[in-house]
Image: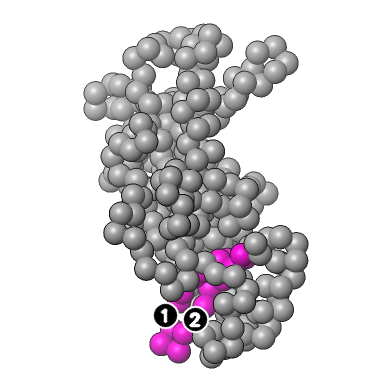
Amino acid sequence: MPKDFSEKQAIGFINTPPLWVGKEFGLEQFSLLNLNLSSLDHLAIPSNRRLGHQMEYVFKHLIKQSQQFELILSNIAIRDEKQTLGEIDFILKNRTNQNYLHVELSYKFYLFQPTVKEIAHQLIGPNRQDMFVKKLHKLKTKQLPLIHSKIASKILLEHNINTLEIKQFCCFKAQVYTPYRAKLPEAFTFNKACILGYWLGINDFNQNDFGAHKFYIPSKAEWVIVPHTNVSWKSFEETKTCIKLALEAKRAPLVWMKKADKRIDQFFIVWW
């Protein structure tokens, strides 16, 4: 992957807000401060990894460049004989107070469903497979408790780390998309800064509302970057044909739309 694209991905990661601020859902957010952005010039993210793993690569790079934190361990597979129990994302050390931290990283794309009453159920992935409530449950019952397992405790003790004293955090970043033309409820629980666009069905993607604009369908690797004009824009009809093919395969594409004033909207078109 070209370094300039890797830099765009890293900047996109940095600029993506946390899904909540402080402590919510019983989980505390981890935040990176005073980042050395000049180091991004030397970043080359492997292109053969899934987007989530690429974001882990960015996070690891930022920690290594940080003056506040030291990277102790990362991507620690916890195995009981032949069975893999899970993986611990990151163990860090705060250089200021010498505390150890366990950080689980998440980078998600969610569609907001305002008609759903239960807060944790309001966010779903574009293809309805990824749900915030499931991720929340996994974090609280599997990923974070894993550090206190006998095997994990033994591994960390080899690094003179007592798991009973370690502090746990989530670095949970997300892009949130609200329904097309829907008014955001005043009681929106999540961080409003995460709202980057909207979502709609193919029937709402019509000539009257969208026909005059130009479009680009970014690859999954581009979803994290800030939309820009230096891409190959297509007409409404060309784009609608591409979208229909994606929807037939039950894939909800992300779309960038360039308006006459060069402002860019981004939205998901769903198949369900």
Q: Quadrant of the C terminus?
A: bottom right
Q: Is residue 256 magenta?
A: yes
Q: Depth check: 78 or 122 in front?
A: 122
Query: x, y (%) of residue 70?
Result: 37, 29
Which SS class for mark 1?
loop
Report the residue marked by disc 1. 263
Q: Amino acid at mark 1?
A: Arg
Residue positioned most to the left? 96
Residue 41 visible in image: no
Q: CA distance from mark 2 to mark 1?
A: 6 Å
What number is the disc on residue 72? none
Q: Residue at (35%, 31%) from the top-left corner?
A: 26
The reply to whether dot 2 and dot 1 touch (C-beta < 8 Å) is yes
Badge 1: how crowded within 10 Å, few (<14), some, or many (20+)? few
Q: Residue at (50%, 40%) from the top-left corner?
A: 133
Up the image or down, 59 lies above or below 80; here it is below
Q: Residue at (67%, 86%) from the top-left corner?
A: 237
The residue segment tinted magenta is 253-270
- Location of residue 241 (image quadrant): bottom right
